[in-house]
Image (cartoon, rainbow, N blue to C red):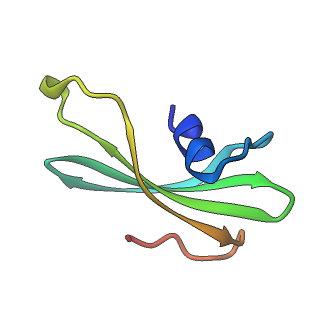
Amino acid sequence: KVKPQLEEKEGKTFDVFTAVEYKSQVVAGTNFFIKVHVGNDEFVHLRVFRSLPHENRPLSLHGYQKSKTKHDELTYF
């Protein structure tokens, strides 16, 4: 659901977009930190926010880090 948001911010499309690892952090909702394979040896780390159920908002891309590798540790940012 956040792929189009990242594509818009980066100004390109990703043929490959596969989550390979994630961590979560409970706040007033939930932050998900997701390592995504975007093709070749490229990975992107995403910070995605899911609001509380009663707020009824869609998933939101709150930040990302590009130029990551498969072996880069997924950390909170």
Residue 74 in the image, given as x and y percentages of width and height: 51, 70
Answer with left or right where residue 45 lies relative to residue 15: left
Residue at 73%, 41% in the rendered image: 13
Answer with left or right where residue 2 lies relative to residue 36: left
Residue 30 in the image, given as x and y percentages of width and height: 26, 47
Can you name the residue that lies furthest to the bottom here?
72
Instruction: Return the residue nearer the eye: 10 or 18.
Output: 10
Answer with left or right where residue 4 lies relative to residue 25: right
Residue at 22%, 23% in the rendered image: 56
Can you name the residue that lies furthest to the right here?
40
Instruction: Please tell me whether residue 2 is drawn above or below residue 24 in the rendered image.
Output: above
Instruction: Return the residue nearer the eye: 75 or 47.
Output: 47
Residue at 82%, 65% in the rendered image: 41
Residue 33, quarter of picture: bottom left
Residue at 74%, 52% in the rendered image: 38
Q: Please state, as top left, top right, bottom left or bottom right, where the C terminus lies in the image.
A: bottom left
Residue 72, quarter of picture: bottom right
Residue 43, quarter of picture: bottom right
Circle count:
0
Residue 23 in the image, given as x and y percentages of width and height: 42, 58
Residue 1 in the image, given as x and y percentages of width and height: 51, 31
Instruction: Please tell me whether residue 15 is drawn above or below residue 28 in the rendered image.
Output: above
